[in-house]
Amino acid sequence: MIMRFSSNRAFTLIEMIVVTALISIMLVVAIPRLDGGLFSGGADETARWIIANVRQLKEKAVIEQKTYLLNVSPDIQRLWITEAGMTDVEADAARKSGHALPRGVNIDHVAFSQTERFSGGTIAIGFYPKGYSDKAVIRIRTNDGDRLAFFIEPFLSGANLVKGDRGW
């Protein structure tokens, strides 16, 4: 009895068609979910910026032993980072290179307590060398009706995102 082993192994046409069909079905299901994302109207970009920078500022303040400020301006719809003691020229450059909110996304207000809310001017949230920050909530709304709140807690490492009208 002679056994032959073929070295020409390949997929059959039927196997390739079945795999292609399965991949196509998965893409048809997955792409609409990715398109809308978690938020709509550019809010996801702003959410990522705030969450990433809050975490970075807390770490950077401790490592460099400097006070940093997250500046929020509902008037010009912009967020930017400055260092305590910057010159006016440096602070202006930081403002210009900061995060401009996408069209359809607006800063509603910044709150430091249930009674202390600011919806105009430049509001500075401090991050300090001892590892804590100011307690604050940044409220953002979109033209699609979404409301987002970013809770910055003094001793937690990042910002907590809450969708909807919960919290102050």
Image (cartoon, rainbow, N blue to C red):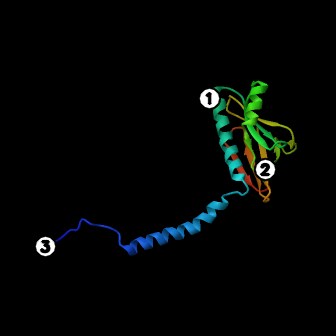
Residue beneath disc 3: 2
State which tag comes first along the sequence, 2 or 3: 3
Q: How many marks?
A: 3
Residue receiving disc 2? 140
Residue shown at the point (78%, 50%) measured from the top left: 140
Can residue 50 be seen?
Answer: yes
Q: CA distance from mark 1 to mark 2?
A: 30 Å
The amino acid on which the numbered mark 2 sits, given as a three-letter code, is: Ile
| Residue at (80% x, 57% y) in the render | 143
Marks 1 and 3, Cα distance to the nearest angstrom? 73 Å
* Front one among 154 and 15: 15
Residues under numbered marks 1 and 2 in contact, where contact means CB atoms less than 8 Å apart: no
Tell me where residue 141 appears, x and y as whole percent: 79, 53
**Marks 2 and 3, how far apart in space?**
76 Å
Q: Nearer the viewer, mark 1 or mark 3?
A: 3
Residue visible at 76% across and 29% down in the picture: 91
Q: Tell me the SS state at disc 1.
A: helix
Which amino acid type is marked by label 3? Answer: Ile
Residue at x 77% of width, y 31% of height: 92
What residue did someone put label 1 on?
63
Question: Which-is-in-front pick, marks 2 and 3?
Answer: 3
